[in-house]
Amino acid sequence: MADLDGSGFTHLDRMLALVRRTRELLDRVVDEGGLGAEDAAFLERTTLPHVEGIQTGFHGWLRSEGADAAELRYLLLQVASMRVTPARSDADRAAEISEAAAEARLAGRSLADGPEPTRLSAAEPWHLAALHHARVVLAFMPRIPDGDVRFPSGRRTYVDIPTPRGPAELADRIAELEAELWKAVTGRSSAPVDPAFRRTYGFFDAADRLGVRAFRGAA
């Protein structure tokens, strides 16, 4: 018998399970201060690739006419190779090595193989769907009734978290999701009172609450 709770679409069902599990793991970060190896591996191998798919969808969706010159310059500077400076402290170098090792594992490579060559690829339909889903979630987040907010610490509301107003703000929010998840994977999670952590938790809380309804809004 078919699962009556399922959407009938494999990608969608997997994504809904992903956002639910990710929110549960962020609860664990708050309660326990970090994640075990298995839980961190889920974020690394499942959640982060999904967020990277959202970023790919953003790059495939953005058109020059959708942003003014200042925004386009800002967005170009978000490309890692154009903005990242060399590590200057022991902490920066440790984070750089840890993230490089995690990225190599995702790509099935060894650090000894050197950095993966840059490749250009078009956004796939699912990446665009993931982006539009994320946009609906970000718009819905500040509208969640306070009584339905599941953030377990501090302010139990998202009303103060604004919806991104343009491509630059949207790019920043997507990048923030990735950065906060990497911190959790590498054992350097932000404190629950950190606004970036609360926005990240709120994203997955809202996505879980919206469920399949978000895709009707993104259509």
Image (cartoon, rainbow, N blue to C red):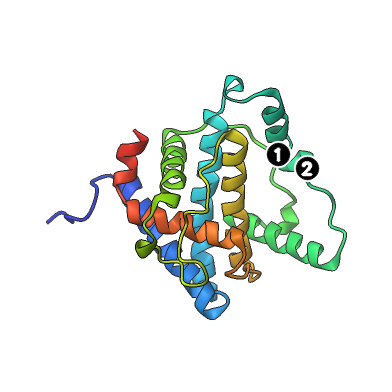
User: Which residue occupies 58% across, 47% down?
Assistant: 173
Mark 2 nearby-residue class (10 Å; few <14, some 14–19, many ≥20): few
For this view, does 73 lie left or right of residue 62?
A: right
**Residue 116 can be seen in this image:** yes
Is 9 placed left or right of 62 in the picture?
Answer: left
Q: Quadrant of the C terminus?
A: top left
Tell me which residue sits at (62%, 68%) in the image.
189
Relative height, residue 58 to residue 103 (above, below): above
Which mark is on residue 79? Answer: 1
Q: Which residue is mark 2?
A: 83
Secondary structure of residue under mark 2: helix
Decide: is 143 above or below 102. above
Q: Nearer the viewer, residue 15 or 133?
A: 133
Q: Amino acid at mark 2?
A: Arg
Viewer-proximal residue among 12 and 116 = 12
Q: Residue furthest right?
A: 88
Mark linked to residue 112: none
Quarter of the image holding residue 81? top right
**Residue 113 percent across, percent down from the top left:** 72, 53
Whether residue 11 sits left or right of residue 203 in the image: it is: left
CB-based contact (under 8 Å), mark 1 and mark 2: yes
Tell me what residue is drawn at x 53 percent, y 57 percent. Answer: 200
Q: Amino acid at mark 1?
A: Val
Mark 1 lies on a secondary structure that is loop
